[in-house]
Image: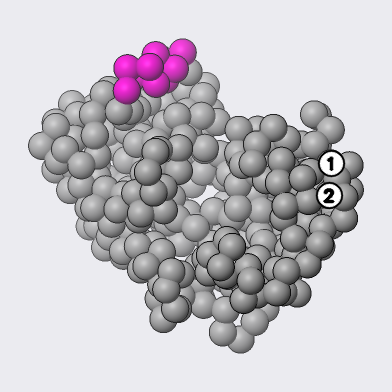
Amino acid sequence: MKVFIAGGTGAIGRFLVPLMVEAGHKVVALTRSEERASRLGEMGATPVVGDVFDEAKLARLVTDSRAEVVLHQLTAFGDKGDPYANTMRIRIEGTRSLVAAARAAGARRFIAQSISFVCSPAGGGLTDEDTPLYVGADSPVRPLAEAVASLEQQTLGSGMAGTVLRYGWFFGPGTSYDPSDSIPAAIRKGAMPLVGEGAGAYSYIDLRDAAAATMRVLERGTSGIYNIVDDSPVRFSEWLTYAAKLLGAPAPGREDVATARKRIGALRVYYQNEQLGASNAKAKRALAWQPAFPVWPAGFEALYSGR
């Protein structure tokens, strides 16, 4: 089928584009830079240079691609400035532009990248696709949840078959969990203490597993909301202690919540001490999908051993 992807060189895109090309799909990929355009060409996609906020040009590019499916995999976490603010803008305004361009081009389906970790923690346990987003949270969690809610509402109300993929926390090569990146560096320095009880529950997903699940959605024509996470959510306290051992780092210290809010901000405190993990039961059942790394220890052992 003909696919237009925005975010083809992003976290998932760099694994997803080659899978789509190998499967025989005709892939047109949007990028803002000529440098990334050449990378997309090497992956087998047809690159087009443009900006999601340039609505007129975007509409022309999507129409010219004759896309049947538009994939929204854009974030701004590799950009300069405020990556959270820029990504929230993409989730609200960028989604609006992409939906409008897809509709104008006559696309049948719209698939968008969302996140699983801004659902309401009320009631505890695992969240699922029916758990409401945490739009009643205190700042700064609330603006993030509101931006995610906007993306999801626009996708599901687009007039096309809409699919929302609530991915878990990405890990794997090229992420912040990469052995050479910021999180392992902080752990090795003893600069990532446990916040409070470290009770936040993380649902992880290896980028390759995320790309494989997205391929299932693309090829099965599935619509609705799906959590794309592994089988084993883990408390931050357990993950951090285990990761430190894998990295040969000192055992993590502790930091009270009030101090952590001042040092790393309320959003990171929410992640590390309050968020809930997510269930992948619906995605596994509907997509006949099973992650290659179903449990987080195996995934991180492979990542930190270089396998």
Front residue of 192/20: it is 192
Decide: is 169 above or below 52. below
- Can you give x and y, in whole percent of width and height, for residue 78 in the image? 45, 37
Residue with the mark numbered 1: 247
- Can you give x and y, in whole percent of width and height, for residue 67 in the image? 27, 33
Q: Write the residue at 57% across / 79% down.
A: 121
Report the magenta stretch's main SS: helix
Q: Decide: few, some or many residues near mark 1? Use Cα within 10 Å; few <14, some 14-19, many ≥20.
A: some
Tag 2's secondary structure? helix
Would residue 62 be seen by someone viewing this image from the given angle?
no
Q: Decide: few, some or many residues near mark 2? Use Cα within 10 Å; few <14, some 14-19, many ≥20.
A: some
Q: In the rendered view, how is the structure colored?
A: one colour
Q: Write the residue at 49% across / 58% down.
A: 115
Q: Amino acid at mark 1?
A: Leu
For marks 1 and 2, give the CA distance: 5 Å
Front residue of 37/153: it is 37
Q: Write the residue at 75% across / 74% down.
A: 197
The reply to whether callout 1 and callout 2 are in contact (CB within 8 Å) is yes
What is the number of the mark on residue 84?
A: none
Decide: is 161 above or below 302. below
Q: Amino acid at mark 2?
A: Ala
49 relative position to 224: left or right: left
Tag 1's secondary structure? loop
Residue with the mark numbered 2: 244
Front residue of 198/70: it is 198
135 relative position to 54: left or right: right
The range drawn in magenta is: 33-42
Looking at the figure, which quarter contains the C terminus?
Answer: top right
